[in-house]
Amino acid sequence: MSDQEPIEIAFRLTLRDFYKVYFHTLLRMWLLIPIVICMVALLAVSALSDFTCRTSYLIPALRFVTVAAALVGIGFALPYLLARNTMRTSPMIKGEIRYVFSESGVETVTTASRSQMDWAGFHRAVEIKDFILLYMSSRVFHIVPKKAFVDASHLESFKSLLRRKMEGRIRLKP
């Protein structure tokens, strides 16, 4: 496949796709990090006050287990709730999504819309395990599933196009 030919893909996003993307972005973004830091700091201050008052070790241990369970719950539940809400409320993603990537930009076609964006409109591109995320801002992105490409060379042509058009603004796996 020539680098000059438009690259076209079509796919449907599932709840599992959104969950994977949201899980990744929430863990990688600063969103959960301050929550974890605050919880650990509160736990440490609380534990120190319990130890200085010479109370039972059971209370700090239970508090630690409760906070740890809450953090794990937030880490897994929040991405699921966001994914479910996106699937339920966004009419654009309920049907097939089609992207056409070309030298001039990205054309997006859904059951509810059609748009064209120049490469300059993208903030950055990030590759994760199953997807490539094309960011329009720090929190808004297009999800491009790798499984939507016909084969590995089709995906590599797309990555090559990204490297040319988004030089310095990409984080792709080799």
Image (cartoon, rainbow, N blue to C red):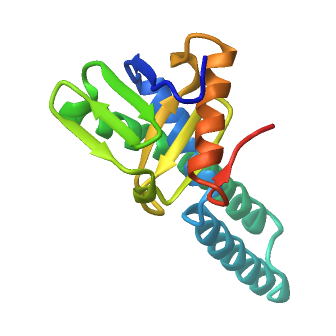
Q: Residue at x 34, y 24 (%)?
A: 98
Q: Look at 84% across and 89% down and name the residue there.
A: 52
Q: Residue furthest left?
A: 112
Residue 76 visible? The answer is: no
How far across and how far down the image is residue 145, in percent? 52, 26
Horizontally, residue 118 falls left or right of residue 35, namely left
Residue placed most toward the observer, 104 or 166: 104
Is residue 92 positioned above or below 104 on the image? Answer: above
The answer to which quarter of the image holds residue 109 is top left
Q: Nearer the viewer, residue 168 or 134?
A: 168
Residue 97 x, y percent position in the rendering: 32, 24
In which quadrant will I find the C terminus? Answer: top right
Residue 74 place in picture, x, y as percent? 54, 51
Residue at left offset 49%, top offset 46%: 134
- Would residue 45 be seen by someone viewing this image from the given angle? yes
The front one of 33 and 70 is 33
Compared to residue 86, the image places residue 33 above or below, namely below
Q: Position of residue 111 (x, y in %)?
A: 18, 24
* Quadrant of the rendered image containing residue 68: bottom right
Say which of 36 and 61 sits in front: 36
